[in-house]
Amino acid sequence: MKLAKVKLSDGSRRGAIVDDNSVRLLDFDQLENVRSLGDVLHAKDPAGLAKFLVDQAVQPVPLAQVTFLAPIDKQEVWAAGVTYKRSQIARMEESKSGASHYDKVYSAARPELFFKGTASRVSGPGEPVRVRADSNWSVPEPEFTLVLNPAMQIVGYTIGNDMSARDIEGENPLYLPQAKVYRQCCGLGPVILLATGELDLAATKIILTILRGGREVFHGETSLAQLNRKLPELAEWLAKENEFPTGAFLLTGTGIIPPDEFTLENGDSVAIEVAGIGTLANPVVKG
Ligand code: DO4
Ligand code: MG
C-alpha cells in the first residue's frame, strides 16, 4: 500500500491511500489520537488503520486532480553516507585532505550518519530544491529512504534527494553540515510505500535524470543491490543512544554521482525514479 499527503483543488490538505489512478482520502477526525500521516505510519498496523480511516463521504479523487506534498510531519531527517562504492570514490577524489576518512568509513562497522534537516527544509514533489549561492559545484543525490517509527522500525520507503555542495564538502570535511543542511536542501516523496516483507534489492532500481532547458544532461542508474550496507543495519546505528519520539526519515546514501565537471544550474530539473515507489521531480533554484 502507498500512502501520501495531498493537496486538493480547494487548497485543503489530506492524507491519502494512493491507488493506480486515484487516491482515497483519509479522515483524521475519526480517532482522537490519529491526526496526521505520521500517526498512521507509527500505528501498529498502518495499512489496516489507513483502510479504516478512508473517508466514506467522498469519492476517490483522480491522480490528475491532486498535488502530492512531502510525506513528512514532525520527523527529523537523517542521512547515511559513503554506502556505495561510487560515493566512496567520488568523495576521495573531491577531498584531497579528507580522502582517507571516506576510504575508512566505507568499510568500517560504524556507518557515516549525519543530520540532514527538519520538515521545514524539505521540498515535496514539484517544489524547488536549492543550490547554495556560495557553491559552484553542487549535485543532487538520489537516495532510497527509510521511514522509521519512534521504535526505529522500518515502516515504509520513499525517495530522497540529498542535495549536496561538493566544493564546500571537499574543501574540508568539517564543512559537511554546511554542504548538506540549508533551506530546501532535501526532497522527499511523492509517496510512502509501506514496508511488507523482504525487498528485492536488485529489482529496486534507482534512476536519476537531470534536464536543462528540457534536454537531458545527465542520466544514471543503480540498484539497492549495490548498497554496501543492510537497510536494518543503518536504522539500528541511527537508533543507538538516540530517541526519535516523532520518528525519522533516513536517506541511505547515493550510488549515482554525475561526472566531476557537472554542476547543477538554476532552472535545471531533477527526477529520481525508484522502482515500486514512483518519481520525485523537483526544479532547481540557485540564488
Ligand atoms: O560524507 C559525505 C556525504 C556522503 C553522502 O551523502 C552519500 O554518500 O550519499
Ligand atoms: Mg548523500
Image (cartoon, grey):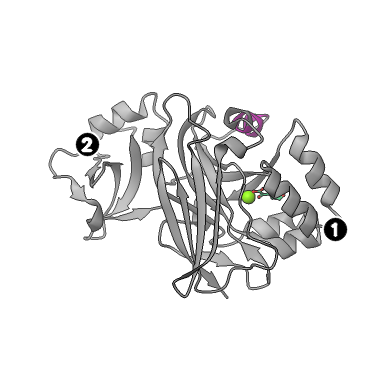
Q: Position of residue 109 (x, y in %)?
A: 75, 30
Residues in magenta, as a range: 234-240
Q: Is mark 2 within 8 Å of ligand 2?
A: no
Circle 2 sits on which residue? Answer: 54
Residue 35 seen in the current view: no
Q: Is residue 69 magenta?
A: no
Q: Is mark 1 within 8 Å of ligand 1?
A: no
**Image vertical order of residue 44 relative to residue 146, above or below:** above
Q: Are marks 2 and 1 in contact (CB under 8 Å)?
A: no
Kindly identify which numbered label has been placed on residue 96.
1
Q: Quadrant of residue 140?
A: bottom right
Which image quarter holds the C terminus? bottom right
Name the amino acid type tagged 2. Val
Q: Could you tell me what secondary structure mostly forms the magenta stretch?
A: helix
Q: Position of residue 96 (x, y in %)?
A: 85, 58
Circle 2: element type: loop
Cα distance in 3D space between marks 2 and 1: 54 Å
Viewer-nearest residue: 205 or 192: 205
Left or right relative to 44: residue 93: right
Q: Residue at x 85, y 47 (%)?
A: 100
* Disc 1 residue crowd, few under 14, some 14–19, many 20+, Cα 10 Å: few
Name the amino acid type tagged 1. Lys
Which image quarter holds the N terminus? top left
Viewer-nearest residue: 92 or 45: 92
**Image vertical order of residue 164 relative to residue 107, above or below:** below
* Disc 2 residue crowd, few under 14, some 14–19, many 20+, Cα 10 Å: some
Viewer-nearest residue: 84 or 67: 84
Q: Residue at x 18, y 45 (%)?
A: 60
Q: Position of residue 25 (x, y in %)?
A: 23, 43
